[in-house]
Image (cartoon, rainbow, N blue to C red):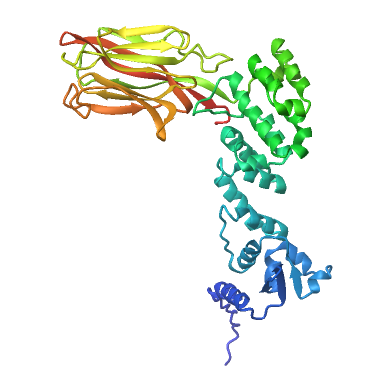
Amino acid sequence: MKSSRVDSPYTAKDPSHGFFLWSGLTWMQKEERFCDVTLKIGKDRKLRAHRAVLALSSKYFEALFGANWVEGKSNEVELLDFDEDAITSLVRFVYSGTVDITTDNVQYILEVANYLGIEFVQKECIRFLEENLNKNNCLNALQIADTFAFEYLREEAKLVAVRYFTEICMTQDFIHLPHHLLTELLREESICVVVDNLIPRADKRESVVLQAVFRYVQYDLGKRADLLPKLLALVRLPTLSKEHLQEVSKHSLIIGCRCEAIVEKAMTVKSNETGDGSTDSNWAKRRDFAKCVVTWGRTFVGTQQIPSKKKFITGRYFLEDSIDGVNDEGVYITGITVWRNFPTEEPRSICGLEVFYSNNSRWLYGVKSGQKQNEIFLKENEKIVKVEVQSGTLINSLAFYTNKDSYGGLKSYRGFCPDYQGGCQGSHATVRSQSPPGICGFLAGVAGETCEFQGQPCITRLQFAWKTFVCNDVT
């Protein structure tokens, strides 16, 4: 007797079918098997492919091979005026699902992906650009973002460009910027100017922006002369010193492009600053890109526990309250003399510090002796950016480094100490260094303690105060 049970259907599934299908299609495209369309990508270069595969991955090909386009019925499709290697990479992508994106090809890959409507590759190119933004490629990324209307990438590229404005304004990418993008950069409040690894005074800072505009216009004077008045309106000319403005008024570009009236107006605005929020008042404001703050570093102390005789802080009255709207940096150290005990006396250590400030004040802590261990007097736009302390039982020696280049590195003012390699006071002498946090920081003050040890005056504890800039775009 036959059973009345109806067998349920069984669905057999090959787990390797997808891989087999796409690897097979990739092989067929490479070997030009069963291809039904030719892509002409260059004068003497063609690719064979399958219409169905192209249409599945590309909105452009999906539309082209549809019923509404006569061109799609042709056996050959032209894709000229694009980078040939980029088109080849995208055709391989629609078969394999992988594409190599590099710094050198990302722009070309993105152009082709955008034209063909391959969204995955578009997004990956944008992500690659965003994750690899730096001062060397930010202007190129800005132009790409402008071309394809990628707003987030555009804003991120501008942030990098204004952060490293001093460096990028000297590049060929800057000279070749479309003028509307240069205008956008000049409008930015956060343009950061750094000279010799320091942020200069406000009355000198805008000079870098002005010189960048001059270089841009001079590069193609015939076509850009008419742009100079518009660009000068975005340079904070009234923040320059009167002497500098007088020099600017005699510049060949100012005279040749008939911009004398703009400079004269800047002088007038500078002389009659009202701060009333008007256009001229805003023009006269320095760019508010960063704030100057004071931070104290770690304490350096000798190994010997000696009762303190006296504590000191150099410049305690103007360390944190001297940051003003003109200089940004306020009062700062311009020189230090380090006094040490005589070589014949024990302990051989620092016994006094004499600190000189930019407001012509001088502070002495400890005592002067007949032996200078170290002495430094800074030149214009030179500041101490690193301190090296050698300590054993006491503070034995100090070395200073400034922002000025010396043989490819920081300029060093190293103090003399007998047996510097380890024979100073104390059997466990160590050398430690300290630099400011943040960007463009410099030494602003010193704190410490003095005492007597074995009948000799000594400094047993040191701490350094640093002034440093924190960019307003840092969150």
Residue 354 lies, with reference to residue 397, above or below; the image says above
**Is 76 or 371 nearer to us in this picture?**
371
**Is 456 or 116 nearer to us in this picture?**
456
Quadrant placement of the C terminus: top right
Snapshot quadrant of residue 355? top left
Residue 408 lies, with reference to residue 22, above or below; the image says above
Snapshot quadrant of residue 99? bottom right
* Residue 233 shows in this picture: no
Q: Residue furthest bottom?
A: 1
Residue 174 lies, with reference to residue 102, above or below; the image says above
- The percent coordinates of residue 136 (x first, y second) are 56, 43
> What residue sits 77% from the left and 29% below the top?
257
Instruction: From the viewer's perspective, tell me whether residue 473 is left or right of residue 352.
Output: right
* Residue 23 shows in this picture: yes
Snapshot quadrant of residue 110? bottom right
Quadrant placement of the N terminus: bottom right
**Is 32 or 237 nearer to us in this picture?**
237
- The percent coordinates of residue 200 (x first, y second) are 54, 22
Exactly how many numbered labels are in the figure? 0
Instruction: From the viewer's perspective, tell me whether residue 127 is left or right of residue 297.
Output: right
**Is 161 or 292 nearer to us in this picture?**
161
- The percent coordinates of residue 432 (x first, y second) are 30, 28
- The percent coordinates of residue 430 (x first, y second) are 24, 28
